[in-house]
Image (tube, rainbow, N blue to C red):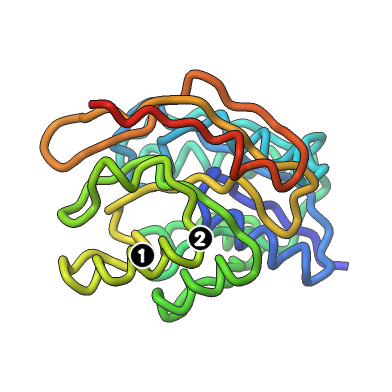
Amino acid sequence: MPRFCALLSGGKDSNYALYRALRMGWEPACIVVVRPARDDSWMFHTALLEAPTLQAEAMGLSRIVAEVAVSGVKEREVEELATALERLWLERGGFDYLVVGGLASEYQRRRFEAIASKLGADVYAPAWGLDPEEYMRMLVREGFRFIVTRAAALGLDAGIVGSIVDENLVEDILRRARKYGFHPAFEGGEAETMVVDAPHYSKSLCLEGEVVGRGGLVYELVASRLWLAPKGSHSRCIKVDRRL
């Protein structure tokens, strides 16, 4: 049976990639949560980094989580991740695939492929190259529920931050993307997301927090509390104050 190590950021893309690997029947060797020291990392998610460990617990996989601290400095953070993965490779008895999210970032893809190649592994990125509009619809259709945790593009305002993306909101996002020209699945960093429920979760994530302005077009969700609750309760336990 193939074994894999998955990078889990808390967002929709890494969650979907991990979900697909599990659906393939592969064995998870490690789940890596990367914690950049800077908010302007070129490679890694920076919002609500408490979420991935809770998500792994909701999947029943918390025992194999490994947290990796990186500088967040361009290129140096890639080397730091590579070093950490080499150590995990030895500790966990190797793996066949490095599982990552992402649809179109050549910058990230090339670097993940270089890291995996050194380990003798392949990259598994099931969302790569998918039509972004259909991908967003598919996520919602298959039972992924996520919230926008950071918006940083014309057409995405404070009102969308902290809202659960369902069938109606996903269509609204796609309409805005066509009108304002941002990537429909946020591949260009226009927004960041956090999954609160998914088909492979046995529990849901709950959150209390507020939306704050960071200047310009940037709005971010700051959590005061993040916890797990019975599955399906996300629609009742996400409480966000948007009074800027």
Disc 1 residue type (three-letter):
Ser
Q: Is residue 84 visible?
A: no
Kindly state the secondary structure of the residue where label 2 is placed.
loop
Residue mark closest to the camera, 2 vs 1: 2
Q: Is residue 49 left or right of residue 17?
A: left
Q: Position of residue 100 (x, y in %)?
A: 56, 58
The C terminus is located in which quarter?
Answer: top left
Q: Quadrant of the N terminus?
A: bottom right
Q: Is 5 on the left-hand or right-hand side of 160? A: right
Residue neighbourhood size for the residue with mark 2, other residues' Cα within 10 Å, grouped as few (<14), some (14–19), many (≥20): some
| Disc 1: which residue | 105
Position of 65 compared to 103: left or right?
A: right
Task: Check disc 2 and report the residue beneath it.
Answer: 166
Which residue type carries mark 2? Asp
Q: Residue furthest top?
A: 224
In terms of image quadrants, where is residue 124? bottom right
Q: Say which residue appears at 15% left-offset and 54% top-offset.
A: 154
Task: Return the residue nearer the eye: 7 or 174.
Answer: 174
Compared to residue 225, the image places residue 197 above or below, namely below
User: Residue at horizontal 79%, vertical 42%?
Assistant: 61
- Point out the tag, 2 or 1, that comes first from the N-terminus: 1
Of residues 195 and 231, the one nearer the viewer is 231
Residue 115 location, x and y as percent? 53, 55
**Dot 2 and dot 1 residues touching (CB under 8 Å):** no
Marks 2 and 1 sit apart, C-alpha to C-alpha, by: 25 Å
Badge 1 element:
loop
Q: Quadrant of residue 176?
A: bottom left
Number of numbered labels in the structure image: 2
Instruction: Give the image location of residue 240, x and y in percent.
Output: 43, 31
